[in-house]
Amino acid sequence: MALPRLRIGRTLAYVAALAVSAFVLAPIYLITIAAFSSFDAVYEYPKNLVPKDASIETMRVFLDSEGITDSLRRSAYVAAITIVVCLAIGTPAGYALARFSFRAANPFQLALVSTRAFPLIIIAIPLAVTYLRVGIDDTVYGVAMAHIAFTLPLTVLVTASVFAGISYELEEAAMTLGCNRLSAFRRIALPLAFPGVAASAIFIFVTSWNEVFAAAILTFRNRTLPAQLLAALDTSPLTYRLAGGFFLLAPALVVIFFIRKYLLTTWGRVAR
Amino acid sequence: MTTIAQETAPLKRRKRRWEGLPYWLILPTVVYLGVFFVWPMIQGFGLALRDENGWGLTAFQTMVDDAAFGEAVSFTFLLILVIVPIQFVLAFGMALLLNARLRGGGIFLYIFLLPLAISDLAAGIAWSAIFTERGYLNTILEGVGAVDVPFIFLDPTSKTQLVMVVAVAEIWRSTTFMMVILFAGLQAIPRDYVEAAEVFGAGFFQRVRHVIFPMLKPSIQVALLLRLIFAFEVFAVVIALTGSGATVLAAEAYKWQATNENEHVAAAYSVVILGLSLAAAALVLILLRTPRERRLR
């Protein structure tokens, strides 16, 4: 709407959109072809800008290197724990915000929003100290607990927004037809909220999968993928870094496809 | 900020016995955040304000005396000064493009959103493959004859070059985040307003300046605010691209914690990062304040 109606403006808009797309896609494309080429191709110069000798050599060596499959598995564990706990305790709170007007609602919501002003760094360092004392240092649980603390506020806000978008009258109708509050929630609100909650879960997944600082500080031997890559940055060969970078980045391609609509509606709204 | 509780018209509770229910529902979240967010933060201040010998400002003293501190502060600020203005213009442009309903808009939407799910470490690794001496950018530059010998972009002796390179990677990665917030704001602007301006002969830039910009101000505020807060946490992308050539505040916090194993100085860094983010947030709120009588919504 904001763009000129004139044809020339339209053309310019397409040119601009294509230029931005090229800028976004170029690094993704290049790291992908590098990750799926032979060692020789990775080190040669000038480089091939089109995949000429595709090979799984770089990928295979990376996956075979010490500790990588373990760190991939740990990253997946951490993300899974984070998703389950976040949704288990965040969804009820989101539902409460959406469905009840209670005195603590506004302060609670304000507190959730303001957590975003506090960098993860300031909680990660004390957690490292506490974990050491309690004896859960260097575990996937420790990392997951930090990730939950970091993603929970947004999860509550997003699920609240999801439930707020589902008419309460449907639940009321179910209750007049013999459902109690819990079964009305389970049989009406939850199925309707499912796509939104699933999108939320996916977003929690990428946040956890991508998080570097806390993961790097809270693990030492049992590193997750980003922690492992960060620690090995200056000691590992280029092929290792590229393949690792690809693994770190690859979920984005799938994840954004599934949640693109929600990102613009729900997250955009919640952020304001 | 409109709260969700206000958005959904207040619902009369059917039965008195549900009175306490919302509190039970938010309880786990409150407890969790108390234990894993608020308490560690208090501990963080405690760690920063003491060392092995007791309370005091020695951790801050150690931090400030370290040569890397000044470097980290200046590099962090330089990055923000370069990144945020460019990013804002780009994010605004991208949001307008998505809002323009181009044919193939769904594909553009997907592509524009991709960086949102990419970590700064992955971004740093991908861009280092481009900027490294025997990398993709030099391949292209040599291919078109722009340079004769590979240009060293990641020259550890040139801070300016390092700032520029990291800025490109950060702009690539984190502009989408601003775009999402601005786009949501754009969609909330009634179409009639823009069309009315058009009817009265306002050109594209006039419409942007006099209609869209004022109405988008709350979103702009939030976008800048959150972006600035996150900008002080920039970390892995700098390490991945510059190695030890440059450092930022969060990288120093990491180094003191993981390498030097001194959690007090690391916590001092985190307190500085927190202080700067809050100061930046306050600055945005003050600079972009809308006087009450001029509020549109």
Image (tube, coloured by chain):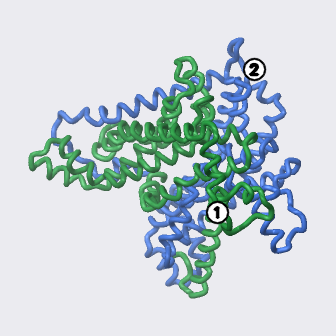
Q: What is the secondary structure assignment of the residue under circle 1?
A: loop
Q: Which amino acid does label 1 sit on?
A: Ala
Please check whether the numbered discs 2 and 1 fall on a single chain.
no
Measured from the top left, where is residue A77 in percent x and y?
A: 47, 38
Query: Residue A214 appears in which quarter of the rendering?
Result: top right
Q: What element carries label 2?
A: helix
Give the Cα distance between marks 2 and 1: 56 Å
User: Which of the pair B89/B75 is nearer the observer?
Assistant: B75
Letter of the chain in blue: B
Q: Is residue A209 positioned above or below B136 on the image?
A: above
- Specify the amino acid type for callout 2: Thr
Q: Is residue B237 left or right of residue A187?
A: right
Q: Residues within 10 Å of mark 2 (few under 14, many from 20)?
A: some
Report the residue at 58% width, 53% height from top. Answer: A249
Residue at 85% x, 71% y is B146
User: Farthest residue in the top direction?
Assistant: B53
Residue matched to label 1: A54
In percent of the image, x 82 and y 57: which residue is there? Answer: B133
The answer to whether B203 appears left or right of B129 in the picture is: left
Q: Where is residue B28 in the image (x, y as percent from the top left)?
A: 37, 31
Q: Residue lying farthest right?
A: B148
Q: In which quarter of the image is residue A17?
A: bottom right
Q: Can residue B213 be seen in this view?
A: yes
| Residue at image mark 2 | B58
Chain letter for mark 2, please: B
Residue B46 in the image: state x and y as whole percent.
62, 21
Residue positioned most to the bottom = A7
| Chain ID, green in image | A
